[in-house]
Amino acid sequence: MKIVAPHDRPREKLERVGAGGLGDNELLAIVLGHGVPRSSALELANAVLDAVGGLHGLARATTDDLRRVPGIGEARASQLIAAVEAGRRTLVRARRDRSQFMTAREVAEFLVPQFGTRPVEQFGVILLDTKHRLLRTTVLSVGTLDASIVHPREVFRAAASAGAAALVLFHNHPSGDPTPSADDITLTRRLVQAGDLMGITVLDHVIIAESRFCSLKDRGDLTL
């Protein structure tokens, strides 16, 4: 990093002003650690951010996406993916006190840090006790960019195994638009009916997309 003054190099700057004073590229340069021939760590960080569309895009990037950047091999791609996932997990609320979900917004606030920027669709359930307190969160299906396949027996097998009295369905829309499709609504109604037969209440189906969400219960789409 010969063109950057010593006190403005990312690591030195971090010590001087703290992490909050660093730009996205500087933070990424520290994660990368060092550059490659003809490219400093900062230049390499800039190339990564340009390739994925900024730091927000990095949250959606795959190892294959990152390896297309000259200077980013398998090890560094894995390093970046791991750093993103570590950051994602720090946003998830501590589990010491069991979370209680009474509104769709509370569900969304719980789910968005974990699933809001996933690059493929994931369908799961939040399993709850009789007071709507969290028992566990289970991902049941990982689909393509625009579809996932879920069968009622998988949903209620997971619920029965956890001793759940109620559950909230959820999935993410990688497109960034949380508006439910006709298939989303059909599946939801099918699962509500199955829940009635099983004695396990389907409280809602929350669709998340980046920082946005949509509640099928609030839309009135849970039943016919």
Image: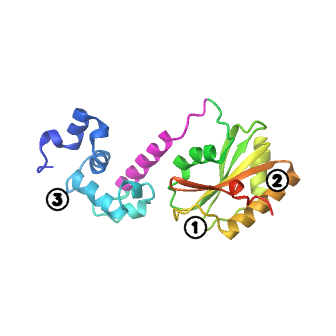
Chain-order first, disc 1 or disc 3: 3
Percent x, y for residue 137? Answer: 65, 45
Q: Report crowding for label 2: few under 14, some 14 to 19, many 20 or more residues within 10 A (C-alpha).
A: many
At label 1, the amino acid type is: Thr
Percent position (x, y) of residue 206? 65, 54
Magenta segment, which residues?
Answer: 75-96
Q: Residue shown at 31%/62% (left/top)?
A: 50
Which residue is labeled 2 in the image?
Answer: 195
Q: Nearer the viewer, mark 1 or mark 3?
A: 1
Say whether residue 24 is left or right of residue 116: left
Instruction: Please report the residue visible at 73 percent of the width from the left and 61 percent of the height from the top.
Output: 221
**Callout 2 touching callout 3 (CB < 8 Å):** no
Residue 72 appearing in the image: no
> Mark 3, residues whose alpha carbon is within 10 Å: few (<14), some, or many (≥20)?
few
Dot 1 alpha-carbon crowd within 10 angstroms: few under 14, some 14 to 19, many 20 or more:
few
In the displayed image of the protein, which residue is found farthest to the front?
219
Reading the image, the residue beneath label 3 is 38
The image's mark for residue 179 is none
In the picture, measured across the screen, residue 210 lies left or right of residue 135, that is left
Q: Which of labels 2 and 3 is toward the front?
A: 2
Q: Is residue 223 visible?
A: yes
**How many callouts does the rendering have?**
3
For label 1, the residue is 144
Q: Nearer the viewer, residue 138 or 128?
A: 128
Of labels 1 and 2, the one closer to you: 2
